[in-house]
Image (tube, rainbow, N blue to C red):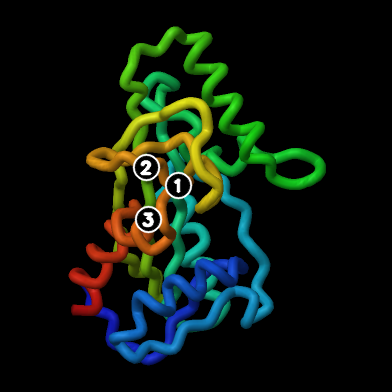
Amino acid sequence: MRRFDGAALVVATHNQGKLEEMTALLSPFGVVLTSNADHGLPEPEETETTFAGNARIKAHAAARATGLPALADDSGIMIDALGGAPGVQTADWAETPQGRDFVMAMTRVWRELEAARAPEPRRATFCCTLVLAWPDGHDEVFEGTMPGRIVWPMRGEQGHGFDPIFLPDGHDLTLGEMDRWEKNRISHRADAFAKLVAGCFA
């Protein structure tokens, strides 16, 4: 596994919140983080059918364009009774002409589970794949998960996405009810980041 020994890293995103989260996680290592937006880079089209595939597209595009190592992630929720859907299409399920509507997306999940007569507990997993890519084409891949189940009705107004219907294993609160710092501590992204740090930074 290749260790990261540079001083600068591009986070392949236009999401300022994601950049801030990753900056905080990597701050102990003295790395200066910038984003795609800082470099005027477009978001590449995500054409793969796996989280790792889409994260690779984003990371390698940013590394090639900037000549710097780049870090990208792709994440979503996989629901057992729906054959792993929505998976890499997690955000797509919320798309409308007016923007993303996750209440609509969560309602769709529940209706499809009901139509399938899915037995309880309705198991699901939040997944996050991180790819650290170098300009020479090398990359390292780290996968994190957070297992749990789907509940209804929606609970809580914290977080985002499908958080109000996801109850993590071992917890009484949905991600929508949970303090953001507690969520960040147990999340699929935290799991992937711990593996990234152990593999490439520690």
Q: Are marks 2 and 1 in contact (CB under 8 Å)?
A: yes
Report, in whole angstroms, how far the alpha carbon at label 2 lies from the one at label 3.
10 Å
| Left or right: 183 in relation to 176 | left
Q: What element does badge 2 sit on?
A: loop
Vertical relation: 101 (above or below) 4: above
Quadrant occupied by the N terminus: bottom left
Q: What element does badge 1 sit on?
A: loop
Q: Nearer the viewer, residue 35 or 147?
A: 147
The percent position of residue 175, horizontal first and vertical second, equals 42, 46
Query: Which residue occupies 62% across, 53% down?
Result: 45
| Left or right: 175 in relation to 43 | left
Going from N to C along the chain, the mark reached first, 2 or 3, is 2
Specify the quadrant of the image occupied by residue 124: top left
- As drawn, the residue found furthest toward the right would be 97
Query: Which residue occupies 59% across, 43% down?
Result: 91
Query: How packed is label 3: few (under 14 Cα within 10 Å), some, or many (20 or more)?
Result: many
The percent position of residue 179, horizontal first and vertical second, equals 41, 57
- Which disc is residue 173 wearing? 2
Mark 1 residue type: Glu
Quadrant occupied by the C terminus: bottom left
Vertical relation: 16 (above or below) 95: below
Mark 2 residue type: Leu
The percent position of residue 114, horizontal first and vertical second, equals 50, 12
| Left or right: 199 in relation to 24 | left
Report, in whole angstroms, how far the alpha carbon at label 3 lies from the one at label 1.
9 Å
Query: Which residue occupies 20% across, 69% down?
Result: 199
Vertical relation: 19 (above or below) 67: above
Q: Which residue is mark 1?
A: 177
Q: Nearer the viewer, residue 105 or 86?
A: 105
Q: Are marks 2 and 3 in contact (CB under 8 Å)?
A: no
Q: Which residue is mark 3?
A: 183
